[in-house]
Image: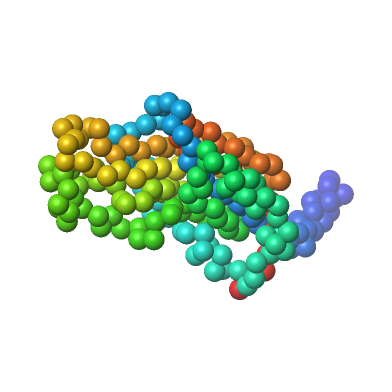
Amino acid sequence: MRIYTRLMLSLLIAVPFISLSTPAQAARSYLIELVVFSMPDRGVDEKWTTTNPPLNTRKLARARLPAQIMEEYKEEPVEIKESDFSSYVSRIRKNPRRNIILATHWVQTVLNPANTVIARITNRRDLADDLKVSNTNIKPGLNDDRLASSQPVLDGFINFYLTGQYTLEADIRYTPVYRPSILDEDPASGPVSYRIYEKRRMKSGELNYYDHPKIGMVLKVTPVEMSVE
């Protein structure tokens, strides 16, 4: 009995030292590289007849632009300079059937869904919807939410998180240019938007292709070493 008591006391004394000597595991940082491009229409799947198909507004509210995310770091990692992702972008750019809408990259730590960084994926300079039909002299009978801008609009987010495995959620909406005509009799023939929504496991170093009848995305994640300000 005395031996058992001594053993238990030894363990109770040793456990705090074991815990203190084991450093907390740091969240790993990843470089995320992304290119989004449009393609000739191959069908009508995943199509909305409104400029605002549903996106997760709660996650959009948390999302930050890639440039804002990169402000946290002192300098660009070597992995960005040595990346061959630009070669894939160049190949897409040379393809006459592909039109690049956005090419971007950022670095982030990957945490649980509640705390991880969400990246806002958009080509809009102004995130406020300030273009209204009421401010134009085109198609006065068209509702304000049915008028697209004078350029293709890409909007959405990339949510990269860890829950036992690395998971990437992509929710992206694309609205091509739409110019209403006074000859249009049916507003339903107005602006059409397309949406990609996917959630998949991620492995570093692999190219991931997201296919859609109208738009495509190529994404790559690479582990990096970053120094934070």
Q: Quadrant of the C terminus?
A: bottom right
Let me know if residue 13 appears in the view.
no
Q: Residue at x 70, y 55 (%)?
A: 83
x, y (%) of residue 23?
Answer: 73, 61
Disc count in the image?
A: 0
**Residue projecting furthest to the left:** 141
The part of the image, by quadrant, that contains residue 13 is: bottom right
Q: Nearer the viewer, residue 224 or 175?
A: 175
Q: Residue at x 42, y 26 (%)?
A: 43
Determine whether 229 is above or below 93 in the image.
below
* Left or right of 45 in this view: 170: right
Q: Residue at x 83, y 47 (%)?
A: 4
Let me know if residue 209 appears in the view.
yes
**Residue projecting furthest to the right:** 3
x, y (%) of residue 52?
Answer: 31, 42
Q: Nearer the viewer, residue 75 or 152?
A: 152
Determine whether 225 is above or below 134 in the image.
below
* Left or right of 185 in this view: 169: right
According to the image, what is the colour scheme of the structure? rainbow
Q: Residue at x 42, y 37 (%)?
A: 195
The part of the image, by quadrant, that contains residue 29 is: bottom right
x, y (%) of residue 103?
Answer: 54, 53
Q: Nearer the viewer, residue 197 or 72?
A: 197
Determine whether 32 is above or below 55 in the image.
below
Q: Nearer the viewer, residue 118 or 178?
A: 178
x, y (%) of residue 70?
Answer: 56, 65
* Left or right of 15 in this view: 52: left
